[in-house]
Image: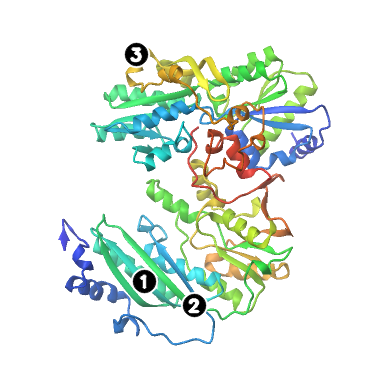
């Protein structure tokens, strides 16, 4: 239905009738098609697997819907498949639930769906089931994706595998996604882009040759500091990191300086942390750096001890401080 | 000056016990972020001072701000740090969750846009700060006068740093030396501390915020104390002049005048606050009345007052890390990013 100059979603699109059919066939199916979806049945019947199955779900409510470096569609694929990869599973199938608010421009929805499909194709995952709903609102869009993967690796991933001396490695610079989104919301002009991306190729490169990776976590909400604390707590370990080794892009660093933010606590959407055996840390680092998303990978610290859970930072001039989990949000300073 | 040598001397200092107060919240934060305490000799103790305007704001101020936010067609504008500061029973954030109209801004100038776009609303700006921030409010009033904007009011809790420093110098002889507040010094100049240094025979250093600046500042104070030298040394000449920022002071003086003010933890001090001058009182939202209405309700167990004057460390407060955490702060020192308790919570050894 045309409202003003732009064609927008209206409640009829969610009724299950003609408008819904038209939306599915002319928009969604234009970009999303495979042997499962094409059947348009109530569920997809998938072939079984000899591997253990990994299952995850995530919902995406980001605004703005489009941003430098990505959009909610790309994020909805990467976020879910990255979770599977962090557990050592190779993503195979995804479901997609789209909740559209009345007033959402169809052009924008089409761009999101196109990006969603493109990202899934590149990641070699199939969208096998989908749903759309329309609710009253103001042009918003929310996406849920559930992902199924096959755990082909025999590597025992988990905190219980952590040993003294293990290296702490991150795949690249911190803070880009959160800095990008905040810049967009606050209308601050800069060239910061979200790092939204598929971690699969990097992770697969480590898993396929059974490299000694102990724990992998993508560095999302709460940032590196929160994740390190969670790992320290679950493994009962003391983790020491070196502030100078933590990569932060200069523009992100300036942005953080102005707003009083700490990159250690900022969300990323295309970075992960891995705890790796000391005797293979160089090999693992080299493999990450070979990938376009891992060129800034660094060894940033080490598991110093087992027995007391704490995360410490060696500062630039050789001092030492504790870092804790994120509490609340970072608020701007008053003076 | 060789930094390595400075670091060694600070680490190996074995003279008399030295208590240094660092007044400014940004210094406190930088000291912890850089792990500076771990680089000092055990004979050197760093005490955090009252250089956090949020931390010294009385609870009655928050209550007044909440009152405004509940008025019809009235919106309370505030910087982020004030949102979680507890009043008598709730914070601005709590009030907002209950439906009060509270909006976060990043600059006082945003009030102008809002006021112009919504002439039917009154915007009350929670105006808190030391001399560093006050010129921004002066510029706001100047613009309001030019544009004839009448629907912005200021609820002020503006403070002058010198009276607070004098109070501490006069009442706590155990502090041997001072790292002067950093940002405030850019406005007041290093001259602001000369009288205090002479009168109380205590050395002052004006230092920047990088780890190197602070360490060299500490080194300078060690040397001054050992040489019984009680001067003000400006080690931040790139941004701090002896005479300060005269333009900023002219702006402050044009719109504001000193008056008595209540500081959480320090009490009421003459001439320690700034209030809109009589000809600009039409823009005031009841700031003067806060003195007489003040009962500064403080939870009996909250020891923020002793923390901001350096009489205790945060970990000596019975509520620290127990009833009082950043998520459920009982006092302003835990809430503010520059607050001593909040900084200790995030960065200090458990």
Question: Disc number at residue A149?
Answer: 2
- Which residue in the protein does label 1 denote? A96
Question: Percent position (x, y) of residue B38?
Answer: 73, 41
Task: Indicate left or right for B176 with A256 as reference.
Answer: right
Question: Percent position (x, y) of residue A272?
Answer: 56, 63
Task: Tell me the element at label 3.
Answer: helix
Chain under numbered label 3: B
Q: Distance between the residues labelled 2 and 3?
A: 71 Å
Q: Which of B155 and B224 is in front in this view?
A: B155
Q: Report the mark closest to the observer, 3 or 1.
A: 1
- Residue B210 can be seen in this image: no
- Which residue in the protein does label 3 denote? B279
Residue at 60%, 38% (x, y): give it.
B319
- In the picture shown, does residue B14 fall above or below A189? above
Check disc 3: other Cα within 10 Å, few if <14, some if 14-19, many if 20+: few
Image colouring: rainbow
Q: Nearer the viewer, residue B221 or B302?
A: B302
Residue at 64%, 51% (x, y): give it.
A243
Task: Tell me the element at label 2.
Answer: strand
Q: Distance between the residues labelled 3 and 1?
A: 63 Å
């Amino acid at each position: 239905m045309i409202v003003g100059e732009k064609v927008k979603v209206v409640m009829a699109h969610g009724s299950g009738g003609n408008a819904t059919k038209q939306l599915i066939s002319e928009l969604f199916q234009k970009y999303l098609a495979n042997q499962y979806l094409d059947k348009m049945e109530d569920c997809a019947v998938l072939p079984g697997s000899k591997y253990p199955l990994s299952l995850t779900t995530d919902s995406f409510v980001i605004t703005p819907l489009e941003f430098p470096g990505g959009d909610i569609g790309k994020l909805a694929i990467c976020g879910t498949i990255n979770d599977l990869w962090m557990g050592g599973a190779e993503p195979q199938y995804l479901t997609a639930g789209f909740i559209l608010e009345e007033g959402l421009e169809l052009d924008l929805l089409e761009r999101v769906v196109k990006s969603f499909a493109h990202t899934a194709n590149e990641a070699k995952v199939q969208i096998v089931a989908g749903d759309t709903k329309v609710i009253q609102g103001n042009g918003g869009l929310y996406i849920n994706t559930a992902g199924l993967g096959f755990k082909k690796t025999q590597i025992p991933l988990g905190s219980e595998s952590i040993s003294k001396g293990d290296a702490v490695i991150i795949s690249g610079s911190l803070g880009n996604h959160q800095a990008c989104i905040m810049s967009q919301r606050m209308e601050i002009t800069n060239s910061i882009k979200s790092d939204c991306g598929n971690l699969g190729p990097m992770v697969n490169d480590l898993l396929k040759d059974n490299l000694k990776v102990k724990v992998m976590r993508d560095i999302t909400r709460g940032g590196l500091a929160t994740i390190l604390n969670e790992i320290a707590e679950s493994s009962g370990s003391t983790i020491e990191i070196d502030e100078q080794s933590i990569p932060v892009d200069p523009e992100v660093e300036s942005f953080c300086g102005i707003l009083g933010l700490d990159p250690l606590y900022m969300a990323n959407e295309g970075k992960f942390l891995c705890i790796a055996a000391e005797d293979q840390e160089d090999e693992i680092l080299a493999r990450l750096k070979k990938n376009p998303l891992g060129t800034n990978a660094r060894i940033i610290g080490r598991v110093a001890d087992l027995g007391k859970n704490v995360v410490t930072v060696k500062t630039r001039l050789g001092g030492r401080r504790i870092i804790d989990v994120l509490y609340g949000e970072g608020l701007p300073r008053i003076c | 000056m060789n930094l390595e040598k400075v670091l060694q001397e600070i680490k190996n200092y074995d003279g008399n016990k030295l208590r240094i107060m660092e007044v400014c919240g940004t210094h406190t934060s930088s000291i912890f972020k850089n792990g500076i305490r771990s680089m000092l000799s055990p004979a050197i103790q760093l005490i955090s001072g009252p250089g956090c305007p949020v931390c010294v704001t009385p609870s009655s101020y928050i209550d007044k701000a909440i009152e405004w936010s509940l008025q019809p067609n009235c919106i309370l504008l505030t910087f982020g740090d004030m949102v979680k500061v507890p009043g008598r029973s709730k914070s601005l954030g709590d009030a907002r969750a209950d439906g009060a109209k509270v909006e976060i801004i990043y600059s006082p100038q945003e009030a102008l846009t809002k006021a112009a776009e919504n002439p039917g609303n009154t915007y009350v700006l929670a105006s808190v700060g030391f001399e560093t921030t006050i010129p921004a409010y002066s510029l706001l009033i100047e613009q309001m006068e030019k544009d004839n904007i009448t629907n912005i009011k200021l609820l002020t809790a503006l403070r002058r740093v010198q009276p607070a420093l004098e109070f501490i110098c006069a009442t706590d002889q155990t502090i041997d030396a001072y790292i002067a507040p950093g940002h405030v010094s850019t406005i007041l100049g290093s001259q602001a501390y000369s009288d205090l240094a002479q009168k109380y025979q205590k050395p002052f250093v004006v230092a920047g915020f990088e780890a190197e600046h602070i360490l060299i500042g500490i080194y300078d104070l060690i040397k001054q104390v050992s040489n019984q030298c009680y001067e003000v040394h400006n080690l931040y000449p790139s941004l701090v002049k002896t005479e300060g920022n005269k333009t900023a002071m002219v702006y402050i003086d044009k719109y504001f005048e000193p008056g008595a003010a209540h500081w959480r933890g320090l009490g009421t001090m003459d001439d320690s606050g700034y209030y809109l001058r009589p000809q600009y009182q039409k823009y005031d939202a009841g700031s003067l009345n806060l003195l007489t209405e003040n009962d500064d309700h403080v939870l009996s167990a909250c020891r923020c007052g002793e923390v901001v004057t350096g009489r205790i460390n945060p970990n000596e407060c019975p509520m620290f890390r127990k009833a009082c955490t950043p998520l459920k702060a009982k006092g302003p020192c835990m809430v503010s990013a520059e607050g001593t308790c909040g900084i200790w919570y995030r960065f200090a050894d458990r």
